[in-house]
Amino acid sequence: MSDSFTRVRQVLEPLADPARAAEMTAYMRGRFPFLGIGTPARRKATMPILRTLREFDADLVAACFDAEQREYQYVACDHIRRVGITDLPLAERLVRTKSWWDTVDALAKPIGANHADHTMRAWATHRDFWVRRVVILHQLGRKTDTDRDLLAWIIRRNLGSGEFFINKAIGWALRDLAHHDPDWVRSFVEAADLHPLSRREALKNL
């Protein structure tokens, strides 16, 4: 077992709150058990450990994703945010492991930051919609550096989807860009046959 994971477990287990854990599990529709630790407390306990890791710790990440309680997957995502992830096949496996919006969304930007946009194109038509969600969201936060042609290309390959998490992601990606290029977003929304959810999300702040 990873030494880093052992240290993480040692600092998290004493913070477990069964009552809060039940609430957190219910919020996630019963998909995952929790220790019952909120994000601020989790990060306060684990960041001293994560700061000692200057490079990607594959053993820690594997152990965290193998662990039963959801907070451990969050620790893995916190680590990846700090050091990045250059192994694209591994990144894909993590996205597809215990998939739900919380970890998938946490992984999207770090994956996008560590891989050339052209290598992400293959994910736009992936059979797993969680992988497609990542590629839709992978440019979040790039502001005026967003590759608009790439975003449009990815979105067009996901039009007509009946999947809530895809249509929500399309709207989110467009809304994020709308803060910096509202004219482009308005033009794209008018021209594209977006799902009503995507359209509503894209134009929310315009």
Image (cartoon, rainbow, N blue to C red):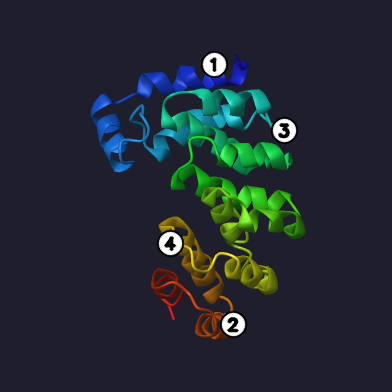
Is residue 200 shown to the viewer in this render? yes
The mark that comes first in sequence, 3 or 4, is 3
- Residue 6 disc label: 1
The mark that comes first in sequence, 3 or 2, is 3
Query: Which residue lies most toward the left here?
Result: 19
Query: Quarter of the image containing the C terminus?
Result: bottom left
- Element under label 1? helix
Is residue 179 shown to the viewer in this render? no
- Residue 196 disc label: none
Q: Is residue 104 above or below residue 176?
A: above
| Mark in front: 3 vs 2 | 2
Q: Quadrant of residue 77?
A: top right
Do the residues bearing badges 2 and 4 touch, measured as CB atoms within 8 Å? no
| Mark in front: 2 vs 4 | 4
Q: Which residue is mark 2?
A: 184
Residue at image coords 51%, 85%: 190
